Amino acid sequence: MRVLTTKSAAAVCQFFVTVWQEVGLPTALQIDNDIVWNGGGRGQRALSTVVRLCLAVGVQVIFIPPYTPQANGAIESFNDLWDTNFWHRTQFQSLDHVRDELPLFETYCRQRRPLPQFELRTAAQLFPDFQPRLLPATFTRHQQDRLPITAGFVHFIRFVSGEGTFSVLNETWTLDAEKWAGKTIRATIDTQTQFLRVYYLPPDTGTCQLIHQFEYTLADTAVPLDSVFDYPRPTLWPPVKEP
């Protein structure tokens, strides 16, 4: 299992690097809680190779709640689009044939696909001047035997149990059950300051609340983000309301 997981993580990292070199670096990567992603099979506070790669290039990772596939609705919707408009639309003859057709699908997604949540405008209409930041073609950091932990943020969307607890990387944390049981929270690891900060977004409001923070000592001290990847990015979360 250890060998399989290591090989799987290496393949995933290579895939991400290739995609980021061709279509650009995202602000964040939303994924589920599979062991390949989170490294949770290696005990507590173990950040996976995939997470370390994302941190190394300034991409924040967002883990959806466990056993909640509906939280990945946008991704599942795109999977359906891929399946219908690409994979089952053509009888592919070879891998080269797939590669030849991919640019057509990408053009459709950017130029001609109407987005219902944006009044049926396309991505090109919404962001006509958008220029992706491509990962350099010379990037090879993911081929290291062990990536360091880079300063950045890893987010976990979690449901608080009736006892006031939630879990992150095989470790259980306790909040005031009277206040927070049954709520959805965001637990964010700040790898630089080594704190786990817990936020709550009240319904119909535009600001988050910092409701608790725990010391979160990691095995390694975080290295600074390389200046190549330290540039302004869109804000992921609503601002935090000052206490």
Image (spheres, grey):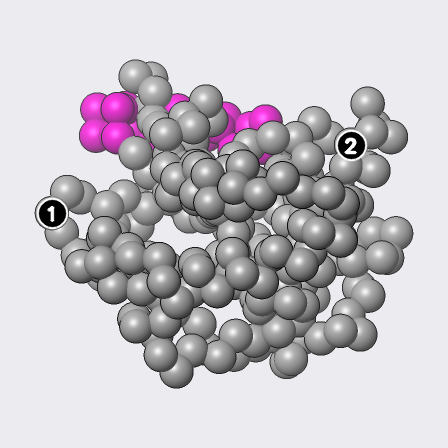
The residue stretch that appears in magenta: 165-183
Kind of residue sitting beneath label 2: Thr
Left or right: 75, with 170 as reference point: left
Residue 236 visible (yes or no): yes
Identity of the residue drawn at 30% across and 72% down:
125
Q: Tell me the quarter of the picture where residue 157 sits.
A: top left
Residue 140, horizontal then vertical, whole percent? 82, 65
Left or right: 14, with 181 as reference point: right
Residue 15 shown in magenta: no
- The first of marks 2 and 1 along the sequence is 2
Where is mark 2, residue-wise? 5
User: Quick one: 7 or 235, which is closer to the camera?
Assistant: 7
User: Quick one: 62 or 187, which is closer to the camera?
Assistant: 62
Residue 201, horizontal then vertical, whole percent? 23, 46
Residue 153, horizontal then vertical, whole percent? 52, 56
Left or right: 92, with 207 as reference point: right
Identity of the residue drawn at 22% across and 58% down:
120
Mark 2–mark 1 Cα distance, whole angstroms, equals 41 Å
Tag in front: 2 or 1: 2
Q: Is residue 82 above or below residue 180?
A: below
Residue 176 shown in magenta: yes
Q: Tell me the quarter of the picture where residue 74 sits.
A: top left
Identity of the residue drawn at 17% across and 44% down:
202
Q: Is residue 140 above or below residue 72?
A: below
Residue 124, horizontal then vertical, whole percent? 36, 71
Q: Residues within 10 Å of mark 1 (few under 14, many from 20)?
A: few
Where is mark 1, residue-wise? 204
User: Quick one: 33 or 226, which is closer to the camera?
Assistant: 33
Q: Tell me the quarter of the picture where residue 241 sits.
A: bottom left
Q: Is residue 135 above or below residue 29?
A: below
